[in-house]
Amino acid sequence: MIQHMRSQRVLRTICYAALLLLLAPVALAQSPGKIPREVIDQAAAHGTALVLVGLNLPWQMESKLSDADLSAQRTAIASLQSDLLNKLEGRKYKLLRRYQEIPGIALEVGADALAELARLPIVTNVLLDRPAGSAIPPPNQSASQASTTAVVVSSEKVPSALFLRAARDGTVLVLAGLRTPWQREEGLSEDLQALQRNTIHSAQSYVLAELAGTGYKVTRLYGKIPGIALRVGVDALIILEKSPAITNVVLDRPAQVRR
């Protein structure tokens, strides 16, 4: 029970740290617009895009607030979220999640809603969100290659073929995607890059804590993308399948020896 509560606290910390990408004011100073090109392209290609929207509201970490101030901050966040949804009325959008701890909201939006988000002064910035099960691009893979990969990934978080291979060979090399908002670093300031890398590291640490006691070995820890490469057995695959921090698991290839 204590371990479960600890895991929940760690996971919430990861989520909050990732969502702080929405709050950093430096993004406004260094970005030419609130809507990144990748968000616009996603909406144009698929009709909608999953996004995390940052809201313009003074905010402090809840650990620094008194009970009264914490309650007041959450009330202000909820009020601003409602204001945003009212302003999107009549446009193509779907509410996915309202956050009470940070001034942000998760939405699925069409082009008309994106245009409204770009216009509204209560919106600070918009990040592309990723659905569970979406593939993450390997470090040297292009955006077009990543799109192709995402199409062929199984709807299962851990494909059955990986369980079969692990059962047959004892272990299997995998690349696990981590559930954390992510943008390519060339579109981020140095502060946001550092924040994103810290969030990735926290997610990796959480997964490794979950895997304690199973047959696994870390083969690569990525610093710039939300992923981790592992050699795992069946017991570890079961943990990855159930982990709330994992979006998907794909077969990895062994490193090539250069001569």
Image: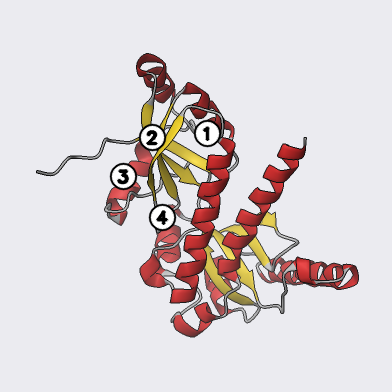
- Residue 39 place in picture, x, y as percent: 45, 63
Check disc 4 and report the residue beneath it.
225
Q: Residue furthest bottom?
A: 29
Quarter residue 8 falls in: top right
- C-alpha span from label 4 to label 3: 18 Å
- C-alpha span from label 1 to label 3: 24 Å
Amino acid at the residue labelled 1: Leu
- Residue 194 place in picture, x, y as percent: 47, 68
Check disc 3 and report the residue beneath it.
148
Instruction: Judge whether 251 appears above or below 86 on screen.
Output: above
Q: Residues within 10 Å of mark 1 (few under 14, many from 20)?
A: many
Check disc 1 and report the residue beneath it.
240
Tell me if residue 159 can be seen.
yes
4 or 1: tag closer to the N-terminus: 4
Q: Secondary structure under badge 1?
A: helix
Check disc 2 and report the residue beneath it.
174
Instruction: Judge whether 68 appears above or below 240 on screen.
Output: below
4 or 2: tag closer to the N-terminus: 2
Q: Residues within 10 Å of mark 3 (few under 14, many from 20)?
A: few
Quarter residue 60 falls in: bottom right
Residue at image location 41% in from the left, 55% down from the top: 225
Q: Residues within 10 Å of mark 2 (few under 14, many from 20)?
A: many
4 or 3: tag closer to the N-terminus: 3
- C-alpha span from label 4 to label 2: 15 Å
2 or 1: tag closer to the N-terminus: 2
2 or 3: tag closer to the N-terminus: 3
- C-alpha span from label 2 to label 3: 19 Å
